[in-house]
Structure formats: C-alpha cells, structure tokens
Image (cartoon, rainbow, N blue to C red):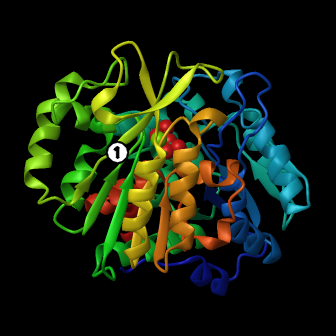
Amino acid sequence: MSIRTLDDLLAEGVSGRRVLVRADLNVPLDKQTGDITDDGRIRAVLPTLGALVEAGAKVVVCSHLGRPKGTPDPQFSLSPVAARLGELLGAPVHFATDTVGDSARSTVADLADGQVALLENLRFNAGETSKDEAERGAFADQLAAFGDAYVDDAFGAVHRKHASVYDVPARLPHVAGRLVLREVEVLSKLTSEPERPYVVVLGGSKVSDKLAVIEALLPTVDRLLIGGGMCFTFLKAQGLEVGTSLLEKDMVETCRNLLERSEGKIMLPVDVVVADAFAPDAAHDTVRVDGIPSHRLGLDIGPETVAGFAAALSQAKTIFWNGPMGVFEMAAFAAGTRGIAEAITKADAFSVVGGGDSAAAVRALGLDESSFGHISTGGGASLEYLEGKTLPGIAALEN
Ligand code: 3PG
Ligand code: MG
C-alpha cells in the first residue's frame, strides 16, 4: 500500500501550517441527557492530534455525528464533543458553530500554532453526503480552504464516499493518521493468512446488514458463530418457530441457502433468553431454541450457547467479533454478550473487536480493553474491509 503517513507529514514540518484532520467523533449520546456515553472514538484520535499539536500545527478537526439530514439540527451538535476533546487533550478546543461559514472561517483564522479547532457537524451540509459529484466537490472546496494539508484519521468513515473523506484529499496533500494506519494494519492480518483456527462471532440485529460479510467470510473462516437478533432468521430457516423475536422474513430463504453451503461452519444458539416485552424489567426465561413460546421474543443467547461458543473460541488462534449477542444495554439480557467477550479475552488468540456497538459493549460491561488484541473504531468500515471492498477513504489516500 503506497500511502503517505502522518510521520511523513511531520518530517516535512508542520509548525505554523494548518492541518485539516478528518476524525470520526460519531460517539453515542444519551437520548435523555445528551451526554457522551462512550468516548472511545475521541480517545482513539488523540495520538494523531497530540503529535500535530506538539509539532506546532494549527489543527482543524472535522467530523460527522449521527445522521442529520444536510441541515443544522441541534441534537447532533458536536459541541459536547469539543468540550470532551479539550479535557482529554488538556487544552481548550476552539469550537466553530458552523462547518464552513463565518464562525468556521474566523475560528480557523484565529488559531495559534499548536491550537486545536473543531468544526460543527459536517452533515449539517448537504454537500457532505451528496451523490452529486459537483455538489460534494463544492463543499470539499470550502473545507479544503481550511487546510494546507489533510490527515484522514476517521477509520469509522472510510467506507463512505463523502466530501470530507473522498473529495478533500484530492484537493490537498494527504496522509493517513495513526489510527487509520493501525486499523488497516490489523485488519489486513485477518484477510491475509490468519493463524488458524480462525473463528468469527457475528451478532447485531439484521442479517441483511451482515449478508455480504457472511458470504465473504464463509470460505475463509473455520467457524462462524451467530448470535444477536439476526440468529432468529437463521433459526427460522432451520424450521424452528421464533415467537415474536426479530425476524427478517425475506431473508429466511437466503439463510437456509447459507446454512446449506456452510459445510457445518455456522454455529447457531441452542438456547435463548425470551421475554414478554422489549423492556429492562420484562419477565424472562431461558428456553431451548425448539421451545420458543409464540408470544415471547428472544433478547439474548442462553448459557448453554455461551458455553458452546466459548468452547469454539478457546480453540481459536484468530478471532474477529462484530455485534452484540443480545440487548446488552439491559442488564437482564447482557449475559450473552459478556460471556462471549470474556471467552474472547481468555482465548490464546489474536482477537479483533470490530464495530461501534461491540466496542461500546466491551467498555459498558467494564471489560479490560487491553485484553483484546485490537478494538476497532469502525463498524461498517471494518466489515467492508473484511468483505474485500474498495474503501473510498483509503483509495483517496492512495492516489
Ligand atoms: C459509524 O458509526 O459507523 C461511522 O461513524 C459511520 O457512520 P454512518 O454509518 O452514519 O456513515
Ligand atoms: Mg454505522
């Protein structure tokens, strides 16, 4: 891969130069209070920002948060992120209340060497995500005007063909930041001759989101363990009744086909925790998968499944995990995710946790982050990498 790196840029000298950094500061916020519930993505970009600050650059950070519709929407403001970033950096972060308007222009112009600014949410501008090249290009022109060089450290967004990810690097000298570099290094270990057995654990709610990665992984992996909401569509494909559990009816046939082709590599739950309702205090029990009552829904994998999955994981030399096994945000349905996470930490394997949700689960459950080989900041991005897709953000850096 012929990508220039942050070290190359630092070697040229950045003192007094404006460096535009695309970060992925898309952190989860508490729906009621608006507080940041997991700051992992902010921490992940500190090595790059710290190095630029130390080298005396004028650092202009930009990011998206959530999915606002191309126009300002206060619930998706990056303002709380600016405050948290400032705490973590140990120096105030100058926050621009727009992305490319008057506030942004004066904030950038007023930066002293070694200071950091954060622009307001990129997605408050329709040009950021537009499918129209000209509209994206016009927005990219405005962004690029804030930098003398561009650093992409937004691994979580490299799979998006968006102005700040794809079009800005065509307009400025560009390099990969420390996080992007580390993520690509780690994920490439999984795609090129992983040490075997290679065991993948997939969870999350929808089969349709994971279909491409399942297709891509099946020939490569030794075992594929499936939990989370999407397991019910697979169970249905085996002819079982799943009550009122999450079910993608139009995917049942696809799942049946995958099971037929999987040469026994796919492992499904043998027991699940079923509840009367999707609520933290709902009455619940563990049942075998052939005994799910018609009026109840599955919200976690059961203990026997955890034991079976853990046994498979204990044999592994390489592990990739994406997606929670149950509704871990509710204590009653967290045991499956916790059990699998613990089994991964105990395995004598190189383990990668992919994804916003699974990474947040690791931290929310109070697990030791350092007992995993790598915790990726990218959900969709890491899956698309493993699918072997061209990632627009990486391709843009290669040019
Ligand atoms: C993510 O959370 O997966 C990344 O920040 C990308 O966000 P997006 O899926 O809204 O593009
Ligand atoms: Mg996403």
Q: Is residue 369 left or right of residue 243?
A: right
Please count the marks in the image.
1
Q: Is residue 45 left or right of residue 137?
A: right
> Which residue is painted at 23% across and 48% down in the image?
212
38 to the left or right of 93: left
Q: Quadrant of residue 210?
A: top left
Q: The C terminus appears in which quarter of the rendering?
A: bottom left
Q: Position of residue 265 (x, y in %)?
A: 20, 60
Q: Where's the N terminus, which quadrant?
A: bottom left
One can see residue 270 in this view = yes
Depicted 301 relative to depicted 370: above or below: above
Which of 3/371 is in front? 371
Can the viewer see residue 173 in this picture? no
Q: Is residue 68 above or below residue 109?
A: above
Q: Is residue 109 above or below residue 223?
A: above
Q: Report if the beta carbon of the residue with label 1 is closer than 8 angstroms to ligand 2.
A: no
- Report whether 31 appears left or right of 110: left
**Residue 57: horizontal and vertical position, in percent?**
76, 69
Residue at x 61% of width, y 48% of height: 361
Q: Amino acid at mark 1?
A: Pro
- Farthest bottom residue in view: 11
What element does badge 1 sit on? Answer: loop
Is 254 drawn above or below residue 354 in the view shown? Answer: above
**Which sits in the foreground, 228 or 174?**
228
Q: Nearer the viewer, residue 281 or 46?
A: 281
Q: List x then y, in percent, for residue 277.
A: 52, 16
How many other residues sit within 10 Å of disc 1, few (<14), some (14-19) or many (≥20)?
many
Mark 1 — residue? 269
